Image (cartoon, rainbow, N blue to C red):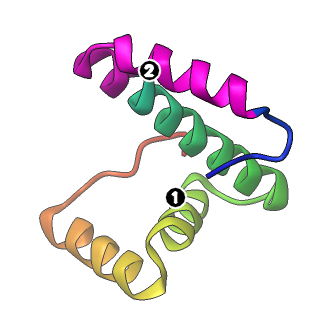
Amino acid sequence: MNPRDTSGEALREQAARWALRSGAERFMYASELTRMAHELTRAGIRQRMPGATAAELEWEYFRLVLGDELARRVFEHREKVGYRQREEA
């Protein structure tokens, strides 16, 4: 992928710097980016559904991330095993 706002030289420099990082460092960076993406997703849901309960927000999050069918199956399993909803989604 070659972003339009980044020169070839900058992309090569970025790749060279990534190559110097350990696998653990790259994993930690990817994990942090994933956590931030999930937080932004949840914030967007809260913004679109300001009056929703924690359970409704959690359902919408799972539905958005997993799709309707898999989200339904996850919630069925959670109910079956007695999972308790946390206060804030």
Does 17 appear in magenta? yes
Does 4 appear in magenta? no
- Which residue is located at x 44 percent, y 20 percent? 18
Against 35, residue 69 (above or below) is below
User: Which region is colored magenta?
Assistant: 8-28
Against 6, residue 53 (above or below) is below
Residue 67 horizontal/vertical position (percent): 48, 79
Does 71 sit left or right of 60 as displayed?
Answer: left
Marks 2 and 1: which is nearer the front? Answer: 2
Image quadrant where residue 56 sits: bottom right
Image quadrant where residue 48 sits: bottom right
Q: Earlier in the sequence, mark 2 or mark 1?
A: 2
Q: Which residue is mark 1?
A: 58
Against 59, residue 45 (above or below) is above
Q: Which mark is residue 18?
A: 2
Residue 58 horizontal/vertical position (percent): 52, 58
- Which residue is located at x 39 percent, y 88 percent? 69
Extreme front residue here? Answer: 9
> Which amino acid type corresponds to the residue marked 2 in the rendered image?
Trp
Predominant secondary structure, magenta span = helix
Which of 69 and 10 lies nearest the eye of the viewer?
10
Extreme left residue here? Answer: 81
Residue 1 horizontal/vertical position (percent): 61, 52
- Which residue is located at x 57 percent, y 52 percent? 54
